[in-house]
Structures are given as C-alpha cells and as structure tokens.
Image: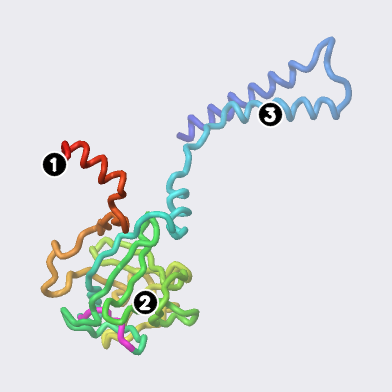
C-alpha cells in the first residue's frame, strides 16, 4: 500500500511539473502572480482527478433518523418483564412512582408494556398496573411519569455480546438504567455499558402465552347510523322482483 501511494504521489507531482512547463513558451503568462494562479489551478485539477469519491454513509443516516421520534407510523407494543442481572429479580413500577428491581416472576407491578418510538431500537417502557412510564431525571434517578412523551422517558435498547440488553437514556446519552444487588436504582451518571448493574434480560410474564397478543389490533369499520336509505330499499325491492 505504501508503494502504491508513493507511486500515485510521484505521478501526481509529474503531472504538476508538466502543467507548470505547459505555461511556458511564446504565449506564457507574465508575472509571478499569474504563474502562481496557474500552478494552483493545475494542482486543484489533478487532486480532484486523483481523489476517490467515498460511498454514502448510510450508518450516519440511520443513526440520525433513529434519534427522531416517529409520530406517523403505528406503534408496536410488546409485553414482557425485565430481569436484572444483579438483583436476580424483575424491574417494577410501583404506585408511588418509584422504580426498583425487586419484582418476583409474574408480579403485577413487574409486567411492562414496551412501545416503539422510532424505526430504530428506541422504546418507551410503561408499567401495566400503574400506567407510569419509566423516566430519568437530570440527576440520573429513575422515576415514574404519567406522560412519557419526553426524551427522558425514551431508552435505546443495546443488545450486548453476552445476550443481555442495556438501556441507554435518549436524553442523557451515556447514562444507563441500572440497579444494585438490593434492587435499588443506581445513579445513572456512574453507570457504564459493560457493568453488570446495567444488564437486563427480557422474559415473558408467568402464564403469558405468545398467542395472547397480536402485533396489530384491527379496528372494525364504522357502521353508519342509517345504513339503508329509502332509495336503496326501493332499488333492492326492484332487483328482488317485488317479492
């Protein structure tokens, strides 16, 4: 690679020298300023010719779009539990708006409804029993909120190599949902992605069957108040032969 880049450099310098001598002769430009301008034009042209156009960065586009909330698409909701790797129990949202990881398998407060926020892996997590969303305040504390439309209530799911999932807050990047061995929320500003306290596993609630939920609910068409007018009844009577 070094030899190839060196050859390209030598070829480019050779072209520059040819460009510089091309301006000499009977019709050469006069004055040092004209020669410098002509020389810089040649350099700019040759650099453009030798430069390779880089492919479009689709990863950057996906990352930017994932940061935006999708208000148009229909939201996909899933119901499961979040098993904490450190406490050995499940994340739960209590009626007093507190969040901990002391829920038993199948506990009513440990049943969570997770809804998508964008086409990426950003989600909102709501306690089914209380209706509170899991959010994070500016001090890095987990709290429950009735309305979860803010970025402080959105988390990015990151699947790790050990098959656990880390949940990074969308408003405070680098801050993760985490719990201690006693199930207490850990201050998010002191958390890292590789720490056990920030590792979770998705589990279906006890007694919950896969067939209990459908990915989309089909809404029936509205029925008009007067489904048949007098004209419709008359036409139907004619088609039936007056029977």
Image quadrant of residue 184? bottom left
Q: Nearer the viewer, residue 146 or 31?
A: 146
Q: Is residue 46 left or right of residue 165?
A: right
Q: Indicate yes or no whether the magenta region holds residue 136.
A: no
Residue at the spot 27% in from the left edge and 57% down from the top edge: 219
Q: Which residues are magenta?
A: 89-95
Residue 92 part of the magenta-drawn span = yes
Image x and y of residue 168, in percent? 39, 68
Where is residue 76? Give x, y as percent.
Answer: 30, 60
- The vertical placement of 21 against 213, above or below, is above
- Callout in the foreground (1, 3): 1
Residue 43: mark in rendering: 3
Work out which residue is located at the far front of the displayed protein and give it: 242
> Which x, y percent locates residue 110?
24, 79
Q: Residue at x 31, y 55 (%)?
A: 226
Instruction: Tell me the element at label 2.
Output: strand
Instruction: Nearest to the eye among marks 2 and 1: give it.
Output: 1
First-in-chain label (2 vs 1): 2
Residue identifier under label 2: 134
Give SS at disc 1.
Answer: loop
Q: CA distance from mark 2 to mark 3?
A: 58 Å
State which tag comes first along the sequence, 1 or 3. Answer: 3
Q: Position of residue 38 (x, y in %)?
A: 77, 25
Q: Which residue is mark 1?
A: 243
Report the Cα–Cα distance between label 2 and label 1: 65 Å
Crowding near pointer 2: few (<14 within 10 Å), some, many (20+)? many
Q: Which residue is at a point 38% across and 68% down the rendered structure image?
A: 155
Quadrant for the C terminus, please: top left
């Amino acid at each position: 690679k070094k030899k190839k880049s060196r050859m390209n450099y030598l070829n480019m310098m050779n072209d520059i020298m040819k460009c510089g001598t091309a301006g000499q002769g009977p019709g050469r430009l006069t004055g040092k300023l004209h020669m410098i301008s002509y020389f810089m034009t040649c350099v700019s042209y040759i650099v453009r010719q030798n430069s390779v156009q880089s492919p479009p960065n689709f990863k950057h586009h996906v990352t930017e779009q994932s940061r935006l909330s999708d208000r148009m698409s229909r939201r996909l909701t899933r119901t499961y539990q979040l098993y904490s790797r450190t406490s050995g129990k499940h994340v739960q949202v209590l009626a007093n708006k507190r969040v901990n990881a002391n829920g038993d398998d199948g506990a009513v407060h440990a049943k969570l409804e997770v809804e998508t926020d964008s086409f990426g892996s950003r989600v909102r997590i709501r306690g089914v029993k209380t209706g509170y969303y899991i959010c994070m305040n500016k001090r890095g504390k987990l709290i429950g909120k009735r309305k979860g439309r803010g970025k402080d209530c959105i988390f990015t799911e990151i699947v790790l190599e050990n098959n656990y999932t880390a949940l990074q807050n969308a408003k405070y990047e680098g801050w993760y949902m985490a719990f201690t061995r006693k199930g207490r929320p850990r201050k998010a500003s002191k958390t890292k992605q590789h720490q056990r306290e920030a590792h979770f596993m998705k589990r279906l609630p006890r007694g919950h069957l896969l067939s209990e939920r459908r990915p989309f609910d089909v809404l029936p068409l509205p029925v008009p108040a007067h489904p048949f007018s007098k004209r419709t009844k008359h036409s139907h009577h004619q088609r039936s032969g007056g029977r």
